[in-house]
């Protein structure tokens, strides 16, 4: 009886192994026969439409005009000085949500809340505990406001793969959080001129590096300006604010552009992804995975073209939807398509067919 069961189990495992082998061979044969031709045809069609697919085509001199960072050094100095004074300010809420569609201005609370993390429910901080910190950093915050008022441009980034992760991004977030707390303190005490200066500096900080090409920089800009929007809403909740002050507040926003260069940032990410594929073609998959890529190399060698084709088709779909949203000046028009494509792409990458997408699975993280 046991011998019959063992024989049955052996047949089952052999069947599963045969199925997996067929799946892999199907991907290999498909990639080797139609991948390169279809991939090159797609690239030709996109270039005929004016698309720039390489970093060299897209940068068009921008990489050479980047100056060595010097104003970002001032940003770093100010951020480190603020952090040394108090680390808890960086975790304080900018807006307190009460429920769906409801919020409370931070300045109206009897105490401040730290942003809750996955491992902590957050804590409360009394205003009195922050007054000394803000008073001690008044000169530093005034310097930060002056620094932010003159937008910085390219920060000397290296536009390769992997991309630089410069510290100036974290420094901007730190300064923006301190400005938000200072804004709340000034609104609370009725000093509107200082509150307005903190808000205006936050808007200006969102304008820093507006021309930067990476998607993460553009997302950071949106995040900083979202903070400024919350401070704007918080300001309007105060009965002490006059009509003239509200008009001045509106003027602060007239020069700010939130979603600038989003499609261009996606074009850059597409070019950087294709550059990664070129690197894999030339040097093997361990050039982007490191030593762990060696185990992927045998299969990846045969599926690189289908992998690159998948990446380009998926990324082009996202870029098309974002361009439609920009032209319509509405994110809602593209949201449904983007969410649906994200779900389908995740299913493809994580499923059995994802064995063919070793590079795409890394680029779409």
Image (cartoon, rainbow, N blue to C red):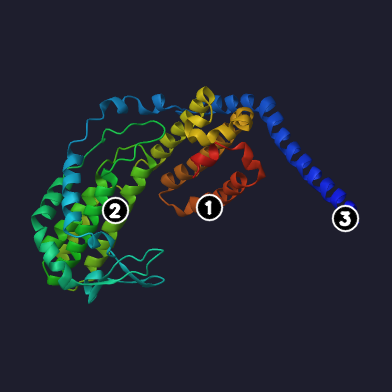
Q: Would residue 40 appear left or right of 61 to someone viewing this image?
A: right
- x, y (%) of residue 362? 51, 40
In the foreground, 119 or 192: 119
List the residue tagged with mark 2. 225
Alpha carbon distance from label 3 to label 1: 51 Å
Q: Is the residue under label 3 in contact with that under label 2 (CB below 8 Å)? A: no
Choose mark 3 or mark 1, whichever is in front. 3
Of mark 1 and mark 2, the one earlier in the sequence is 2
Residue 64: image tag: none
Name the residue located 50 percent from the left edge and 26 percent from the top edge: 278
Name the residue located 16 percent from the left edge and 60 percent from the top edge: 196
Q: Give above or below for 92 relative to 21.
A: below
In the current view of this chain or complex, which residue is farthest to the bottom? Answer: 110
Of mark 2 and mark 3, the one earlier in the sequence is 3
In the current view of this chain or complex, which residue is farthest to the top? Answer: 282
In the current view of this chain or complex, which residue is farthest to the front? Answer: 2
In the foreground, 339 or 72: 72
Q: Which quarter shows the N terminus?
A: bottom right
Alpha carbon distance from label 1 to label 2: 24 Å
List the residue tagged with mark 1. 339
Q: Is the residue under label 1 in contact with that under label 3 (CB below 8 Å)? A: no
Let me know if residue 88 appears in the view. Answer: yes
Q: Secondary structure at mark 2?
A: helix
Q: Secondary structure at mark 1?
A: helix
């Amino acid at each position: 009886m046991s011998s019959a069961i063992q024989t049955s189990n052996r047949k089952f495992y052999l069947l599963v192994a045969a199925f997996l082998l067929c799946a892999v061979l199907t991907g290999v044969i498909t990639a080797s026969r139609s991948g390169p031709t279809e991939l090159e045809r797609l690239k030709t069609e996109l270039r005929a439409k004016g698309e720039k697919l390489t970093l060299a085509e897209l940068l068009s001199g921008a990489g050479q005009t980047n100056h060595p960072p010097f104003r970002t050094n001032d940003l770093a100095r100010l951020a480190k000085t603020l952090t040394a004074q108090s680390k808890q300010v960086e975790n304080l809420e900018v807006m307190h949500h009460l429920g769906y569609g409801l919020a409370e201005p931070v300045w109206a609370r009897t105490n401040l809340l730290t942003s809750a993390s996955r491992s902590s429910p957050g804590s409360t901080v009394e205003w009195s505990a922050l007054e000394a910190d803000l008073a001690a950093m008044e000169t530093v915050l005034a310097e930060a406001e002056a620094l932010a008022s003159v937008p910085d441009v390219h920060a000397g980034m290296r536009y390769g793969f992997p991309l630089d992760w410069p510290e100036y991004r974290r420094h901007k977030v730190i300064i923006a959080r301190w400005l938000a707390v200072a804004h709340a303190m000034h609104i609370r005490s009725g000093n509107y001129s200082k509150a307005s200066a903190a808000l205006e500096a936050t808007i200006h900080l969102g304008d820093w590096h507006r021309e930067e090409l990476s998607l993460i920089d553009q997302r950071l800009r949106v995040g900083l300006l979202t903070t400024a929007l919350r401070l704007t809403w918080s300001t309007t909740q105060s009965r002490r604010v006059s009509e003239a002050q509200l008009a001045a507040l509106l003027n602060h926003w007239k020069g700010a552009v939130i979603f600038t260069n989003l499609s261009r940032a996606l074009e850059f990410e597409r070019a950087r992804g294709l550059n990664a594929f070129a690197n894999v073609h030339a040097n093997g998959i361990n050039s982007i995975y490191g030593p762990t890529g060696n185990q992927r190399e045998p299969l990846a060698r045969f599926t690189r073209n289908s992998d690159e084709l998948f990446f380009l088709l998926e990324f082009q779909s996202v870029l098309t939807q974002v361009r439609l949203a920009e032209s319509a000046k509405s994110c809602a028009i593209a949201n449904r398509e983007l969410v649906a494509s994200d779900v389908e792409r995740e299913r493809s990458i994580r499923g059995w067919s994802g064995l063919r997408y070793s590079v795409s699975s890394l680029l779409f993280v």
